[in-house]
Amino acid sequence: MRLLDVTEAVGLVRDGDAVWIGGSGAGHAVPQLFIDSLAERFATGGVPRGLTTVRVVGIGDFADRGMSQLALPGLHARTIGSNIGNEPALGAQVRANEIEAYSFPQGVLSALCREMAAGRPGLVTDVGLGTYVDPRQGGGRQNDVTTEELVEVVQLAGREWLFYPALPIDVAVIRASTADEDGNLSMEEEAVHGDSLALAMAAHNRGGRVIVQVKRLVQRGSLRPRDVRIPGALVDHVYVDPDQRQTYRTAFSPYFAGQLRQPRPLAPDAAPAAPDVRQVIARRSLLEFAPGDICNLGFGISQQIGAIAAAEGITDALTLTVEQGIFGGAPAAGADGGAGVNFQAMLEQPSMFDFYDGGGLDIASLSFAEVDAEGNVNVHEFDERPRGPGGFLNIANRTGRVCFVGTLTTGGLRVGVDAGRLTISSEGQYRKFVPKVRQISFSAERALAKGQQVRYITERAVFELTADGPTLTEIADGLNAERDVVAHLGFRPAVAPELRTMDPRIFRAGPMGLADDFNRGGAT
C-alpha cells in the first residue's frame, strides 16, 4: 500500500480508463474528495479524457454534488449506472447525446462486481427480462449515440435468461473509515458497506488499481482482524480525508453506523393531524403487510412506511430491509435514504441482492410513474430527465406480494382529508394510468406467469393485477368510480364485482390500531 494525497491519486487515472466509483446515493461511503479533485484536475488541465465511469448506485444529491460534478465536456466517453436521476448535470449530457449511457438494474451491477472478481465471464439472471433492459426493448441504452449491445438473451436449461458480460475495470475508487499502515481497511463509521469488497477484488484480480479514501490512519496491528472489511493485499493506494462525512447530509450518526441504538420516539402529546395524500397512500400500502414479513420499502412515498409502522408499534413484527445492505430496524428516509437505524445486520450489497433475487422478500412497496392497460409499470422514464430504476427491477422480480404506490394523477393535484374523508379540490392535469407505458420497468405478463400478487395503490382507489390488467377493487368512501377514478385513466379497467370501500382508518387522524390487528394475526 502506498500513501499519497488525493491529487496524486487522481493523477493515476489515464485517458480512456474505466473508473468504478463506490458508494451509494447521497454520499453513503462515497469517495467524495476524489470526485472533487478529478473534476478540478479536468477543469484546469483537461485530463483525463474519454473515461468510462461506472457506479452501482446513482451518486449525487439531485443537484450539483456527486457525479454531476463530472459532467464536463470531454471527460466522459461513456457512463454506466442504475440511476442517473440524482446526477442531473450528467443526465443532461446524456439527454443531449454528448456521451454514451447505459442504465442497468442496481442488483445486476452489484452482482456483476462479484462475478468479475471471480473471473467469470459475466452474470446470467432473469432480472430484466421483458423490461427496458431486455435487448429486444432497448438493452438499457439511454440515448441515440449509445449503440453497442451490452446485454444478450441466452437459452439455458430450457429457459430464457439475460447475460450481462463483464465490464472493463482499470481503477476502483472506494471508501473506508480507517486504514492501517498495511492498507487493511475497516468501515466502522460507514452507513453502508455497499460493494466495496467486491469492487476491490474485481479491480485487483483484473489488473486494475484500487484507490481508497479513509478518514484516518492507524499503526499496523491496530485493527482487530474481525473488523477488517478489506485486506491490505487488495489495496494499492490510500489517501486521507479527515473531513470525510458519513453522507452529504449527515456528518456522522452513531445510529447509522450501528454503534448505538436510537431511542424510540416519545408518544405524542396529542393525536397527529389528518394525514396528507402521501401518508394516506403509505398507510394503505402498510395494510398489505403481515406479521413476520420480510419487506423492502422503495424510494419516495414508501419511505414513510417505516415511520408509520413505528408509530403503530409494529416495527418489531416486521423485518424491513434496504437494498444497500441494511437488514432489520428502520430505514432512513429523505436525503439519508439507504441508511438505517437499529438494524439487525449490515450486509454487503451483493449479498442483499442475492437474497432478493432468490425470492427472500415477502412483500415490497415501490413507487410507480406510469401504469398501463396491461399492468406494466414504468418507474424510470417519465420526464425529460434521464433516470433509472435503481434496485426496482431486482426487488420486484421475485417478491411474492408487490404494492406499487403513487397518486392517480399528477401536475396540480390537490387532495385533502376532511373529517376522515378524502376530498379532491383540484385534479392533476397528467394521467399516470396510461394506455401504454413509455418503457417497461415491471412486466405484468411475467408477474402473472410467476403468480405474483400485485396491487396498484393510490390515494382514492386500489387496483389488482389480473389477466384483464389492473382491476379496480377498492375506492375511497364518498367517491364515484366513474367520475373520480375511471374518467382519469387512459384506459377502461375491469371492475371487481364487489367493489370495496378503502379502509376508513387510513384517512383518520391518529394511529390506525395495527398493533391490535397484528396481535390477531394480520393487518387486514
Image (cartoon, rainbow, N blue to C red):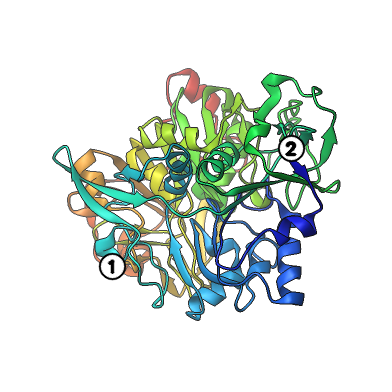
Q: Return the x and y of residue 445 as percentages of the image width and height.
A: 21, 51
Of helix, strand and loop, which one carries label 1? loop
Crowd class of label 2 (few under 14; some 14 to 19; many from 20; radius 10 Å) = few
Q: Quadrant of the N terminus?
A: top right
Relative placement, left or right, of 34 versus 471 is: right
Kindly tell me whether residue 420 is visible in this rendering. Answer: no
Snapshot quadrant of residue 156: top left
Q: Describe residue 195's horizontal placement relative to residue 492 as left or right.
A: right
Of circles 2 and 1, which is in front?
A: 1
* 513 vs 329, nearest the viewer: 329
The one of 194 and 377 positioned closer to us in this rendering: 194
In the rendered structure, which amino acid carries the disc numbered 1? Answer: Lys
The answer to which of 505 and 26 lies nearer the viewer is 26
**Residue 457, above or below 37:** above
Looking at numbered disc 2 in the image, what kind of residue is underneath it?
Ala
Seen at 27% across and 68% down, the residue is 435
Q: Is residue 399 left or right of residue 2?
A: left
Name the residue that disc number 2 marks.
Answer: 270
Asked whether, in this view, residue 490 is left or right of residue 385, the answer is left
- Quadrant where the image shows the C terminus: top left
Percent coordinates x, y for residue 256 in the rendering: 71, 35
Q: Earlier in the sequence, mark 2 or mark 1?
A: 2
Q: CA distance from mark 2 to mark 1?
A: 46 Å
Tell which of 17 and 225 is nearer to you. 17
Callout 2–callout 1 Cβ contact below 8 Å: no
The reply to whether residue 323 is in sight is yes
Name above or below for residue 471 compared with residue 487: above
Label disc, if present, on residue 436 of the rendered structure = 1
The number of callouts visible is 2
- Callout 1: few (<14), some (14-19), or many (20+) C-alpha neighbours within 10 Å? some
Q: Residue at x 72, y 59 (%)?
A: 10
SS class, disc 2: loop
